[in-house]
Structures are given as C-alpha cells and as structure tokens.
C-alpha cells in the first residue's frame, strides 16, 4: 500500500494567476508537489503543481515592483510565480522546494537534515550569511540619511560603500569581484535599489545591475528605509511610524471594520515607535492600507465560541483609543508568537 505524501510546510503566499493578477492563497508543500487553496479552511485545492522535474528560481526580476518572488517551472515548462511576505520566508520555501525536488529525482525520502556532509569550497560565499554580516550594527555597513534630487533617503547607503565594505571584510579580492557579488546580493533581494540611478541599473538599463558609485543608493529590505520629499510636518509625522526596526512580519487574516469580511493581509510589526502596519499582499503596492499604534494597547487570544464566523486561532488588539481589530493566525503557535511580540512592543515602544 502506497503511503500518502507527507506535508513539508504550509502558509500564505501570493500567487500570480491569470491576466497578470496576484491573489493570496493558502499553499501546502507536499513531498511530491504543491497544493494551493483559495482559503485555508477549503477541503479541496484550486490547483496542484507536481514537483517531479521542476526547477525552482529563488529571485525573479520579471516583476520590478514585487519583492520576494520565486518561480517554479514544471517539467512541462509551465511557470508558476509565488510571492512571500519577506526574504527569510521566501528563502525557507525555496530551500524546502529544492530539497523536495532533489529527493524526487534521487528517489529519496524528504528529510530536512542531509546525512551527507556538505562539501564547501573555500571561495563559495553564502549570500544569506553575508547579508547578516552586512547588517551587523557594529561591523556592518552603516546606514545613513542622504539627500538627492530634493528627496531625503533614510536608512540607506551608496553603492561605493557596499564595495568598500566587501573589500575591507575580505569577502572579495578586488572591486570587480565586489561588483559581481553585490549584483548577486541585489538579484537575491538582500539589497534593494533606492532612487532612479540604482533602479535603472537594477532593471538592466546599465552595464551592470549594481553600481559602484556614490550616486547609486541602496538599502536593506528589512531596515527602516523610507524616502521623503522636503515636505510638511504632517508628512513627517506619518513617516515617523516607519522609523522603527521590523520585529516580525507575515500574512494573517484580518476582519474588515465595515463589511466584517475576512481578508489576507501582510502585517509588519515595528518597535520604537510601536506600530503594526497592514498591507494588501496581492497589490504589489508599498503603501499600507492602515496602521495600528500599539503603545498602551491590549492584545488577547479570542476563544472560538465567541465568534462563529471564522475558524480558530483568533486574537484581538484593542488600541489605547479603544479601536478593536480582530486577526486570525494560521496556527495556535503562530497566534502565541504574534501576541507575545505585540505585547512586548506595546510596552517598550513609544
């Protein structure tokens, strides 16, 4: 009797559907393929993608405005695009997808820990580890505020700074190697272009995707980066919300205030100042749909018996101004993590 394929991971991803539209889906990775559902509570999937002979591409440059996209190309050369909510989530999906596809090809059972010792060449560079080193508050690249073309760029750095750091940290032997490595970091989404000069290069309008100049500006995707015009005090107050360091992010279900329907939203939790912003993950728009000021808020788990309109793992945020938000996590563990993170931020963040 043939055993059922085991589940490897699941969660919300945004999938590219027909007519260049993107929709949030509940996605389940099995040992032999991907199943995707319109809602987590659905019994039957909208579709299934086989993994046998599939090729997974970690970062796609086809969609310049969309970050954290990966591509799965089936054996029949059909492309499927998925967008994660942040780069760690994307990398985790890609890692498991690649391992599952390799296990199928090798006739092996999926296992997270390989029994083989990994052979690592001395000149092989792990981009994820390098990214973490670059973000180190003491030894990494220093984020600064720069003004260009009547715009102020916060939490960013120049292309020259990146190459200087790669040379100083002995990650590369010369600036030409640095350019190749920085381009790889950019292609993988570890660096993001800020401003017209770097964006044009990233879109292939220059000789290299990354520029070793002081005119080209870049930033880390999980930093407090934002760009502002020399504008009014009101704008400055709004921008203040985004200065905080990102503590946690991911997709959750949120209940609307007016229509009371439930929709998948990407949530980004920042501290100092303490804000929870939520976005439409399918839109590709970087502007949030709303913000929740968490200073002095109360966050608690909600028992399912009190709300019959949705499945479990609910929690409620009540702000200091007594606005109520109902949110649903995908699991009890995820709910616990979000409640703990929000409670911590609400106490220490201003």
Image (cartoon, rainbow, N blue to C red):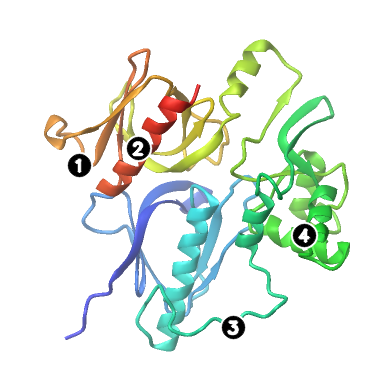
N-terminal-most mark, 2 or 1: 1
Q: Is residue 130 above or below residue 257?
A: below
N-terminal-most mark, 4 or 2: 4
Determine which quarter of the picture holds residue 50.
bottom left
Tag 4–tag 2 contact (CB < 8 Å): no
The x and y percentages for residue 275 are: 48, 27
Crowding near the residue tagged with mark 4, few <14, some 14–19, many ≥20 C-alpha atoms within 10 Å = some
N-terminal-most mark, 3 or 4: 3
Crowding near the residue tagged with mark 1, few <14, some 14–19, many ≥20 C-alpha atoms within 10 Å = some
Alpha carbon distance from label 3 to label 1: 46 Å
Instruction: Residue 311: give its label.
Output: 1
Instruction: Residue 119: give its label.
Output: 3
Alpha carbon distance from label 3 to label 2: 39 Å
Alpha carbon distance from label 4 to label 2: 37 Å
Can you tell which of label 3 and label 4 is closer to the viewer?
A: 4
Q: Is residue 222 above or below residue 61?
A: above
For the N terminus, give its image quadrant.
bottom left
- In this view of the protein, can residue 29 be seen by the observer? yes
Disc 2 designates what residue? Answer: 340
Alpha carbon distance from label 2 to label 1: 21 Å
Q: Nearer the viewer, residue 305 or 26?
A: 305
Instruction: Residue 169: give its label.
Output: 4
- Residue 260 lies left or right of residue 131; in this view the side is left
Secondary element under disc 1, as helix, strand or loop, is loop
The x and y percentages for residue 176 are: 87, 64
Secondary element under disc 2, as helix, strand or loop, is helix
Secondary element under disc 3, as helix, strand or loop, is loop
N-terminal-most mark, 4 or 1: 4
Q: Is residue 169 above or below residue 221?
A: below
N-terminal-most mark, 3 or 1: 3
């Amino acid at each position: 009797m043939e055993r059922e394929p085991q589940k490897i991971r699941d969660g919300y991803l945004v999938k590219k559907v027909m007519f260049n539209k993107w929709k949030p889906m509940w996605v389940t990775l099995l040992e032999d393929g991907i199943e995707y559902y319109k809602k987590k509570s659905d019994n039957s999937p909208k579709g299934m993608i086989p993994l046998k002979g599939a090729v997974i591409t970690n970062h796609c440059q086809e969609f310049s405005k969309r970050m954290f996209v990966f591509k799965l190309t089936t054996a029949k050369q059909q492309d499927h695009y998925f967008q994660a909510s942040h780069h760690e989530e994307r990398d985790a999906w890609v890692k498991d997808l690649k391992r599952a596809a390799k296990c199928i090809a090798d006739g092996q059972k999926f296992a997270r820990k390989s029994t083989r010792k990994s052979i690592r060449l001395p000149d092989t560079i792990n981009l994820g580890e390098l990214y973490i080193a670059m973000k180190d508050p003491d030894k990494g690249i220093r984020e600064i505020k720069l003004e260009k073309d009547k715009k102020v760029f916060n939490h960013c750095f120049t292309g020259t700074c990146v190459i200087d750091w790669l040379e100083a940290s002995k990650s590369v032997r010369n600036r030409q190697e640095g350019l190749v490595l920085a381009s790889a970091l950019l292609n993988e989404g570890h660096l993001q272009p800020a401003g017209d000069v770097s964006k044009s290069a990233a879109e292939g309008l220059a000789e290299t995707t990354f520029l070793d100049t002081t005119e080209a500006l870049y930033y880390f995707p999980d930093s407090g980066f934002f760009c502002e015009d020399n504008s009014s005090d009101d704008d400055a107050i709004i921008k203040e919300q985004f200065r905080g360091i990102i503590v946690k992010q991911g997709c959750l279900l949120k209940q609307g205030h007016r229509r009371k329907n439930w929709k998948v939203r990407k949530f980004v939790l920042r501290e100092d100042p303490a804000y929870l912003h939520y976005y439409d993950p399918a839109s590709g728009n970087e502007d949030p749909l709303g913000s929740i000021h968490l200073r002095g808020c109360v966050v608690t788990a909600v028992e399912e018996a009190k709300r019959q309109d949705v499945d479990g793992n609910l929690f409620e945020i009540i702000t200091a101004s007594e606005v109520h938000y109902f949110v649903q996590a995908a699991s009890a563990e995820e709910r616990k993590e979000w409640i703990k993170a929000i409670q911590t931020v609400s106490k220490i963040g201003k």
